Amino acid sequence: MSAVIEEHHHDDHHHGPDKGIMRWVLTTNHKDIGTLYLWFSFLMFLTGGVMALGIRAELFQPGLQIVAPEVFNQLTTMHGLIMVFGAVMPAFVGLANWLVPMMIGAPDMALPRMNNYSFWILPFAFGLLLSTFFMDGGAPNYGWTFYAPLSTDYAPPSVTFFIFAVHMMGVSSIMGSINVIVTILNMRAPGMTLMQMPLFVWTWLITAYLLIAVMPVLAGVVTMMLMDIHFATSFFNAAGGGDPVLFQHVFWFFGHPEVYIMILPAFGIVSAIIPTFARKRLFGYDSMVYATASIAFLSFIVWAHHMFTVGIPIAGELYFMYATMLIAVPTGVKVFNWVATMWQGAMTFETPMLFAIAFVILFTIGGFSGLMLAITPVDFQYHDTYFVVAHFHYVLVPGSVFSIMAAVYYWLPKWTGNMYDETLGKTHFWLSFIGVNVTFFPQHFIGLAGMPRRIPDYALQFADWNMVSSCGAFLFGFSQLLFMFIVIKCIRGGKKATDQVWEGAHGLEWTIPSPAPYHTFSTPPTDMKEAHG
Amino acid sequence: MNEPVSPTKTVRQLLLVVVGMFGFGFAMVPLYDIMCEITGFNGKTAGPYQSLETQVVDESRTVTVQFLANNNASMPWEFRPEVRKMVVHPGKMNEMNFYVRNVTNKTMSAQAVPSVTPFNAAEYMHKTECFCFEQQELAQGEDLDMPLRFIIDQNIPTEVKTLTLSYTLYDITEQVELAALSE
């Protein structure tokens, strides 16, 4: 991307970026920082992906072949942590950095220096986290949910590094979300009301509020762990009057909103892409905004559905079951609106649209398995089985990850000034689509049949579907190298993109030249008719 | 923007939210305890019982109280109730012992943590004296009869015929040493 932007700099009178590596270290430009976030998250996506392939290789056949059980536990734990905090969240922050200022007609983020800090904390946080692999006792092995006392009394010594890494990620996320909120609330172009903002901006505003509400709770819970481990307190230690179940309550009070933090921006992306390629305005803009806000509110009052089997009284189980099912209503509104947008549209199926449509279908499948899990009595059977694994991978991989890929294909011509290779893009889509479904659909079957999650070995009856699942995982994993190739190829050159890029695209970001100049909207735009599609 | 708002003000408000939510995370600890105490969720029993009303012995019915003693994973002590169960009248003071012996060759500290099932009976289990209110330290080979005095509340719902009082014994030697060091 840098080459293109610098090239542009020569025939432009705007102030351009610095030269060399220090440009990236010291940058306060929202586009540079967005690029850094996106590359970092892609690197973490590959890192977490390698761990996933390690897991699937071990599970290719029953019996222990490749990794020892202790290592397997470290792989599942680190895969989850890296993908959640290192891949999906930074990717959305990167997209927010690139797009939010361009969509609301602002010259940059509101707090550019803090923006730089919030990115540069991340490589250190994940460096610290990954270094635990080389420590005595190994990396965290207690699952990404790090339930006490597994993560306190029985944890490897590296747990302290894990705690500080989580603290750092939390600080980074909180700074990032404060930045997003201040930008959106204070820096919109004159005349742009909240209800004129593109949905991606709306969903990010709500996501950012979720983040500042729950990341401090996560920081609190790891601080309690730290105190239990090193300062003889007993927050989660029953012997000292504490309670391990308390850990789960505090964790999931963070954890459930966290799940929506990873999907709400995806809703915004899909709500931008589908209207473009259906060549219609988004159906039900207002209801989309209200549905997003409702989902965010509900996310705070359903956390104990992760804990149905810990011994909650029946009244509590019923409450959390009904409250959880309620979430299907605003989510259903969204899916309905996407389908209604496509209805009678003049649709074309470029790569971003393919990913967006796959998102709608596959995310809905993940939503339905979520409804099944919400039913308390059956959750007693499904709890901690591969059915749960299938469920949350369906909402996270063909959900969040597909939306991020869709976003990259959709806005890449705007960022680089070049069109990506459409044939290769479609090839990447179909390989990923087939890979994802072959990987995760069979996990529903083995889960319902009773295979527990987080184990390196399994009974023979699960062998066939596990082998299928592993084949799919390798297909999906290696397809992402093609993705990297397509993106690099596009950065280096290709058919020049027009300013609007897509025939049906609406929004302020499509009114500026392609590639987007280093500084945009130094004078705010005045025509708000183009604000959202 | 229609009415200009200072970004600094917004940042300050958001930072307040962050600090507040960090505090809320910690506030969940006492909130959780209060929830459990009020409702008896989780089978938590209260501390030493101070009688608020005179308990009248209800001779007309009996409640079976079962006793369980469990050792936490790494706890080697011998730990058992003197009797497996008692049939008692609500409102009457009862007394029994748990036997404990340190079978190791070093001095250790232990803490017993009680739990009552069914959960909705927890609030009717009043303990006037219990070894679970304090930590036990035993030298190697030492043993002890630990007393428990309790009253089953006269208002216990009639559908509760049996309740189970279970104790889990934890090894807290390390924590005690750590706490002593930090003092």
Image (spheres, helix red, strand yellow):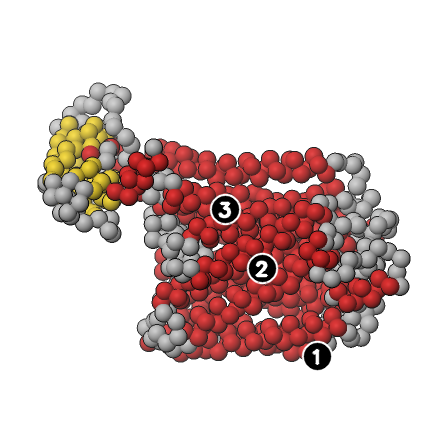
> Residue A348's mark?
none
Q: Nearer the viewer, residue A114 or A57?
A: A114
Dot 1: within a 10 Å radius of its alpha carbon, few (fewer than 14), some, or many (20 or more) residues?
few
Tell me the SS state at disc 3. helix
> Residue A423's mark?
1
Measured from the top left, where is residue A244 in percent x and y? Answer: 36, 46
Real-space Cα distance between discs 2 and 1?
26 Å
Q: Place residue A486 in its image quadrant.
A: bottom right
Q: Which amino acid, mark 1?
A: Thr
Are labels 1 and 3 on one chain? yes
Measured from the top left, where is residue B135 in percent x and y? Answer: 23, 35
Q: Quadrant of the C terminus of chain A?
A: bottom right
Mark earlier in primary sequence (1, 3): 3
Give the labeled residue for mark 3: A218
Q: Nearer the viewer, residue A225 or B117?
A: A225
Measured from the top left, where is residue B68 in percent x and y? Answer: 18, 44
Subunit bearing disc 3: A
Give the labeled residue for mark 2: A88
